[in-house]
Amino acid sequence: MVEEGDEVLAEWEPSDPASVAAAERELQRWLGRKYVAVRSDDGAHFEPLNEDRLPADAAEVIVSIAMGGG
C-alpha cells in the first residue's frame, strides 16, 4: 500500500479480455478492503463506481480510501 503519492495498480486494454479480467480482479481486491473507486475519462470529471465491475472503456479508474464527512 502506498501512503503518499500515486501508484499504478493495473493497466488494461479494452480489446484484451485477459488484461481487463486482471485489472478487474485488482479493483475488486481493493474494494474488498473498503476502498472506493471513481472513473475518469478526462482527468477533470469523476464518476463514482456503483458496482465492483471495471468499466473497461474508462480512461482511468482511481482507487482511494473513503473520505469521512458529514
Image (tube, rainbow, N blue to C red):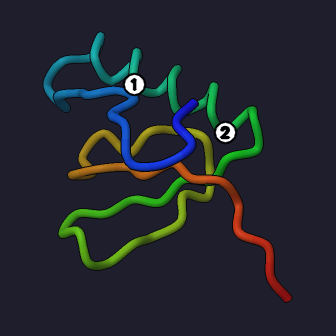
Give the spatial CA distance, label 2 vs label 1: 12 Å
Quadrant placement of the C terminus: bottom right
Q: Height in image: 55 above or below 2?
A: below
Left or right relative to 64: residue 24: left
Q: Establish if 50 lies above or below 42.
A: above
With 69 as the anchor, is 59 left or right in this view? left
The quarter holding residue 42 reads bottom left
Determine crowd level at label 1: few under 14, some 14-19, many 20+ residues with C-alpha closer than 10 A: many
* Camera-nearest residue between 4 and 41: 4
**Point 67% across, 39% down: residue:** 31
Q: Which residue is mark 1?
A: 23
| Element carrying mark 1 | helix
Residue sitting at x 40%, y 18%:
21
| Residue type, numbered disc 2 | Leu
The residue located at (28%, 50%) in the rendering is 60
Q: Secondary structure at mark 2?
A: helix
Whether residue 1 sits left or right of residue 8 in the image: it is: right
Vertical side of 26 occupied by 27: above or below: below
Residue positioned most to the right: 70
Most distant residue in the bottom direction: 70
* Residue underneath mark 2: 31
